[in-house]
Image (cartoon, grey):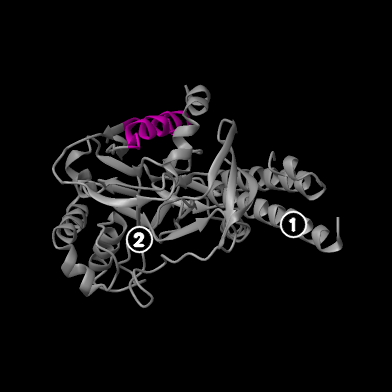
Amino acid sequence: MSDIEKAYEFINFRTTIVNQKHLLLAQVEERLTCYLNGGVFRAEPGFIAFIGDIINSGYESAPILDVNNNPILIKDLAEFKNTLLSSYMEVVYDYWKDWEDIRVERDLKKIADV
Amino acid sequence: MSKGIVIFAFNNEQIDYEKIARLNAAMIEYNMNVPVHIITDIGAVAPSKRHYKDYNQILSFNNSLRWNAFELSPFDETLVLDADYLIMNDRFNAVWGSKNELMLNTDIVPLFKDEFIEEKRLNDFGITMAWATAIYFKKTTLVEHFFNIMKHVHNNYGYYRQVYEFYGDLYRNDFAASIARHMLNSFTEHTMTSIPFLPVSKMVVAKPEDEIVDFKDVNHVKVKITLPNKPNECIVNSIKHTNVHFLNKKTILDNSDRIEELYK
């Protein structure tokens, strides 16, 4: 195999890995959605920290804006934070696990099996 | 309040849309555990013709009765889905009991990263494209107006094509939904009156050239992705727990036995 053929093969390999990461991120994007009392929320680090700040300020319940800017009354902020946090940890852990499998894999067929 | 999913499925000479809808209904019931209502043939509008890349043929295309969803849905809360938008997670359950009466998306994600998407707008300087692939609604006055506008656009398609400057004679629900959304947003974009997005705000789309290689497991699909502008080159990736709109109907039907086996 010539050098240029090796380069082309590597490009295909790299394209597959980069695109697999893109599809894993699409999965993360969908799974980070949480819903409560008719509101939709994203389990993102900044939002989780914000809920933590509200709890630390002494609030047990409060209306919170959802992703569509609807005010949603959250009766138990601590439980809400736990839900967001556990969703985030579960989704990102799965992403990390899949990404680790892909990162070290050098067989194209196995990348497509992740 | 009753809730459920409605799928329109009108067969043509080649494509068994009803079968695709039944396969998707099994996937929806497995993942979301909500009832699915399939509308098969109300025969009110003569089908138009379009070219299907997956079959490389010109076939009948009858997709113009989406506005009837308001009347035909037996549910108080309805999520209308395209038959070929395969549901592989429960994220759409976030819509039930929503504070919003109408939700639809304007964003899509192609299977291939950074692939150029032509249809972000109705034309280069036009209004934002809204996708009729998934529409959530409650039976309210606003929603009735939305579907009435869609119907009006269908009945006066030539006029709206000139006003909104888009190409082609083929009626598309996406265009009618985009115009209805624009009109209900007080003829503006991105204002406080905007119709909200669905909880799954970016729909993953597989273009007609992309194929399912295999359903490896429940909600885990291996896909062959044709590279943009390189019809003879492809990569194979897998996608799991993600809803995918497969524009290639043939590949869904080719894998129907496996889907039935996994989601029975």
Residue B48, position in %: x, y?
A: 23, 50
Residue B94, position in %: x, y?
A: 43, 44
Q: Quadrant of the N terminus of chain B?
A: top left
Give the residue pinned by disc 2: B130
- Mark 1 element type: helix
Q: Is residue B241 visible?
A: no
Q: Nearer the viewer, residue A30 or B2?
A: A30
Alpha carbons under labels 2 and 1: distance apart? 33 Å
Identified by mark 2, the residue type is: Ala
As drawn, A37 above or below B74: below
> Residue at 67% across / 53% down in the picture?
A21
Q: Nearer the viewer, residue A28 or B13?
A: B13
Say whether residue B244 is left or right of residue B95. Answer: right
- Mark 2 element type: loop
Q: Can residue B5 be seen in this view?
A: yes
Quadrant of residue B189 within the rendered picture? bottom left
Q: Residues within 10 Å of mark 2 (few under 14, many from 20)?
A: many
Quadrant of residue B3 within the rendered picture? top left
Q: Is B30 covered by the magenta stretch?
A: yes
As drawn, B174 above or below B46: below
Magenta: predominant secondary structure element? Answer: helix
As drawn, A94 above or below A67: above
Chain under disc 1: A
Q: Residues within 10 Å of mark 1 (few under 14, many from 20)?
A: some
Mark seen at residue B196 = none
The magenta stretch is: B14-36
